[in-house]
């Protein structure tokens, strides 16, 4: 398998210093000529995904080629050793974005001897099966980190938490009583002590310690044990965006840990996570105070909960308590299957009325003042005929704003589709129901059987019951639709036979 350096040389050519040996080769010149020939310079955005890269390569050569790289995409390679990753990053002093998705980077991380990662702001680790102990180590190594992607890593729990989280009143089902009271700062030594303590209390077979002193714990196995404590860490004040799409986290108590570790969090993506509620539960599964739902998210502006397993309007009301939340995605919930009788517009109105601070719903346009007022009035009328026990608190808040409204009168301005018309031919008169969406030609065909007059020999005259004094109007045009004559029940149509000329 190639090194990163070999993949780089294959894609972008030789070192600039070697170009003299190839002076006779033809070089294509474009309108913009970079400082180095296009095939002999490394771009600031370096994309080497799916190249089977498993290691860094010659350090000095890598340093020369990658010193200007700012964005690095190494997704879907064969990297499985964090030491190689750190070697690569140590030769990219300007790198701000790194994508390592679909590399098998499960093992614990040994803190590198000399690595400056002060510029790295965006780290993508989707589908790497990265353990939480490694996440905790990375957070300490990346002080400038602003965006973290941990999607599709099969997490069932969030196994990092702040040292002071025991005072929050919210505990995960994975916490033990002994470790919930730990207050020491997040250091490798303290983590080792926590691991030793948890192994001493565990009834399962003892696992071998990793080279970094952490017990090896995969996220998926954490669901099978209730004795696994979270890794204690200090809050990371830099992270603003966290993506956890497609993991198996089902309890909001676990998500509260994300809020404690990242107190400045502004964007949280939990799409395709089987969350059952936005209300935390304690270790025994009892629901905590509703205030705890938003307590750890004072700066959260965007929350994506699409494809959650939420089936309660009360959880919508809890979203309204997040202090600055303004953008939500709430699509494909089981709750919506109970509102099949509603149109999409009616459902949107109910959501807008319940969420007074939300300005963007499900990726749509910004909610304006007119749309919000219409939604709130519609919400009041929706619950007018409901028993008081079914009316949410939001109903009474909106009645206080708009008053108790009268139901809307259902006025249908569409013309009658079927009317009763009197047909007269010579001395015979019958009354029949007519579909006004039919044409004159179709009407003649039907009258043909009734009066035994061929349609081709038939003339029709329409008589408006209120305008008889003005005479009859001949219905000359075969393709003209009957409703264009404004036919109403009680009108008359006279049939005459054409005279042979």
Image: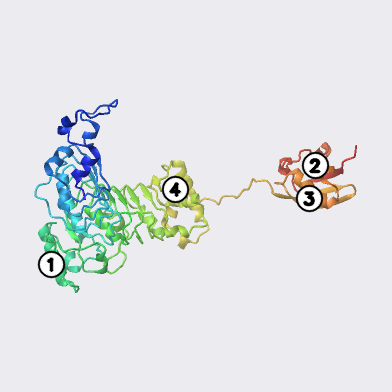
Q: Earlier in the sequence, mark 3 or mark 2?
A: 3
Q: Secondary structure at mark 4?
A: helix
Q: How is the image coloured?
A: rainbow
Decide: few, some or many residues near mark 1? Use Cα within 10 Å; few <14, some 14-19, many ≥20.
some
Q: CA distance from mark 2 to mark 1?
A: 97 Å
Let me know if residue 488 appears in the view.
yes
Which marked residue is nearer to the observer: mark 3 or mark 4? 3
Which marked residue is nearer to the observer: mark 3 or mark 2? 3
Q: Earlier in the sequence, mark 2 or mark 1?
A: 1
Residue 278, disc: none
Q: CA distance from mark 4 to mark 2?
A: 55 Å
Q: Residue furthest front?
A: 24
Residue under label 3: 446
Q: CA distance from mark 3 to mark 1?
A: 92 Å
Q: Earlier in the sequence, mark 3 or mark 1?
A: 1
Residue 323 drawn above or below residue 108 = above
Q: Secondary structure at mark 3?
A: helix
Q: Where is residue 394? Give x, y as percent.
A: 42, 54
Residue 462, disc: 2
Nearer the observer, 110 or 424: 110
Nearer the observer, 329 or 467: 329
Q: CA distance from mark 4 to mark 1?
A: 59 Å
Residue under label 4: 401
Task: Please tell me which residue is depicted at 25% across the width and 44% down the height of the picture.
Answer: 48
Residue under label 1: 196
Q: Secondary structure at mark 1?
A: helix
Decide: few, some or many residues near mark 2? Use Cα within 10 Å; few <14, some 14-19, many ≥20.
some
Nearer the observer, 66 or 306: 66
Q: CA distance from mark 3 to mark 4?
A: 59 Å
Nearer the observer, 320 or 256: 256
Q: Secondary structure at mark 2?
A: strand
Decide: few, some or many residues near mark 3? Use Cα within 10 Å; few <14, some 14-19, many ≥20.
few
């Amino acid at each position: 398998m190639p090194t990163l350096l070999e993949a780089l040389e294959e894609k972008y050519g030789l070192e600039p210093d070697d170009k003299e040996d190839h002076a006779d080769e033809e070089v294509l010149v474009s309108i913009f000529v970079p400082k180095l020939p296009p095939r002999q310079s490394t771009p600031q955005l370096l994309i080497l995904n799916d190249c089977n890269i498993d290691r860094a390569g010659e350090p000095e050569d890598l340093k020369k080629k990658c010193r200007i790289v700012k964005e690095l995409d190494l997704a879907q390679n064969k990297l499985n050793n964090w030491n190689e990753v750190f070697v690569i990053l140590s030769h990219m002093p300007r790198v701000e974005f790194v994508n390592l998705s679909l590399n098998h980077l499960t093992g614990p991380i040994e803190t590198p001897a000399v690595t400056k990662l002060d510029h790295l702001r965006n780290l993508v680790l989707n589908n790497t099966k990265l353990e939480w102990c490694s996440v905790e180590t990375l957070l300490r190594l990346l002080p400038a980190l602003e965006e973290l992607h941990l999607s599709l890593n099969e997490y069932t729990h969030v196994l990092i938490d702040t040292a002071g989280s025991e005072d929050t009143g919210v505990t995960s089902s994975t916490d033990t009583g002994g470790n919930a009271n730990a207050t020491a700062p997040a250091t490798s030594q303290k983590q080792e002590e926590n691991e030793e303590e948890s192994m001493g209390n565990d009834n399962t077979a003892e696992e071998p310690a990793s080279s970094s002193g952490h017990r090896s714990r995969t996220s998926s196995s954490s669901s099978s044990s209730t004795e696994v404590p979270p890794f204690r860490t200090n809050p990371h004040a830099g992270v603003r965006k966290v993506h956890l799409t497609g993991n198996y986290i089902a309890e909001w108590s676990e998500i509260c840990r994300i809020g404690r570790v990242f107190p400045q969090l502004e964007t949280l993506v939990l799409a395709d996570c089987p969350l059952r509620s936005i209300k935390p539960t304690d270790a025994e599964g009892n629901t905590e105070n509703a205030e705890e739902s938003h307590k750890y998210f004072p700066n959260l502006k965007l929350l994506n909960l699409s494809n959650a397993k939420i089936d309660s309007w009360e959880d919508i009301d809890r979203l309204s308590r997040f202090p600055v939340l303004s953008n939500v995605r709430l699509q494909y919930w089981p709750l919506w299957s109970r509102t099949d009788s509603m149109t999409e517009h009616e459902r949107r109105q109910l959501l807008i009325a319940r969420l007074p601070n939300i300005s963007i719903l499900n990726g749509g346009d910004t909610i304006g003042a007119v749309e919000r007022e219409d939604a709130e009035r519609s919400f009041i009328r929706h619950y007018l005929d409901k028993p008081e026990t079914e009316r949410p608190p939001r109903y009474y808040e909106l009645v206080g704003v708009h008053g108790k409204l009268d139901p809307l009168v259902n006025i249908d301005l569409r013309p009658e589709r079927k009317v009763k018309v009197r047909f007269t031919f010579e001395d015979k008169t019958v009354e029949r129901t007519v579909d006004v969406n039919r044409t004159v030609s179709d009407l003649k065909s039907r009258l043909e059987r009734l009066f035994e007059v061929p349609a081709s020999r038939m003339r029709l005259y329409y008589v408006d019951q209120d305008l008889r004094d003005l005479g009859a109007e001949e219905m000359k045009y075969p393709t003209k639709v009957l409703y264009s004559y404004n036919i109403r029940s009680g009108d008359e149509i006279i049939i005459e036979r054409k005279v042979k000329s």
